Image: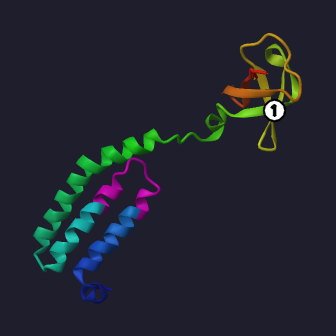
């Protein structure tokens, strides 16, 4: 095994390390491993120039630290600026139709969301919401959606 590794050019080893770090970034939060992947890419020119391992490791460390200092905050800010809601939170704000009349209080009713039927209760209105009425999802309590009627201007 060591003979095989000794036959691979050093710059290719840095490239493999970079790809592994970028691949692992997909399953970890925070854009940390990708910064070390950038450091590995920065070490490649030093390896191509056949500089010592010490110089390559210094390039890796400096590149990683610069990426952590410059890129990581930018990437985290960029990902936070994009709406990445999932699960029940992704339903908030959606416009849907009542499939079974929603009665006041906890009695509730049902709404249709993408072909699925969800239990729903009314917020902000004391009356019944008849079937076929368009409502907006305002939130949820456990698996029960909180909805309000949409005011249509005629």
Q: Residues within 10 Å of mark 1 (few under 14, many from 20)?
A: some
Q: Position of residue 125 (x, y in %)?
A: 76, 12
| Nearer the observer, 1 or 128 | 128
Q: Position of residue 108 (x, y in %)?
A: 83, 21
| Nearer the observer, 70 or 88 | 70
Q: Which quadrant of the figure contains the C terminus? A: top right
Residue 60: image quadrant is bottom left
Residue under numbered circle 1: 97
Check the image and report above or below for 81 versus 135: below
Instruction: Verify whether residue 26 appears in magenta.
Output: yes
- In this image, 9 relative to 1: left or right? left
Which residue appears at 75% of the width and 21% of the height?
Answer: 153
What kind of element bears circle 1? Answer: strand
Residue 119: image quadrant is top right
Q: Bounds of the magenta span?
A: 23-37
Which residue appears at 64% of the width and 32% of the height?
Answer: 92
Residue 102: image quadrant is top right
Q: Position of residue 67 (x, y in %)?
A: 25, 53
- In this image, 40 relative to 122: left or right? left
Check the image and report above or below for 134 versus 27: above
Count of marks, rendered view? 1
Which residue appears at 38% of the width and 62% of the height?
Answer: 22
């Amino acid at each position: 095994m060591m003979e095989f590794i000794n036959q691979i050019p050093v710059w290719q080893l840095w490239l493999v390390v970079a790809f592994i770090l970028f691949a692992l970034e997909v399953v970890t939060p925070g854009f940390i491993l990708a910064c070390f992947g950038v450091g590995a890419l920065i070490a490649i020119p030093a390896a191509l120039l056949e500089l010592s391992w010490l110089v390559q490791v210094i390039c890796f460390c400096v590149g990683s630290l610069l990426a952590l200092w410059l890129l990581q905050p930018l990437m985290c800010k960029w990902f936070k600026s994009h709406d990445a809601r999932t699960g029940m939170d992704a339903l908030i704000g959606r416009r849907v139709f009542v499939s079974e009349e929603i009665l006041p209080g906890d009695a509730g009713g049902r709404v249709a969301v993408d072909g699925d039927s969800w239990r729903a209760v009314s917020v902000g209105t004391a009356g019944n919401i008849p079937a076929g009425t368009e409502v907006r999802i305002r939130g949820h309590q456990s698996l029960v959606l909180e909805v309000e009627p949409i005011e249509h201007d005629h």
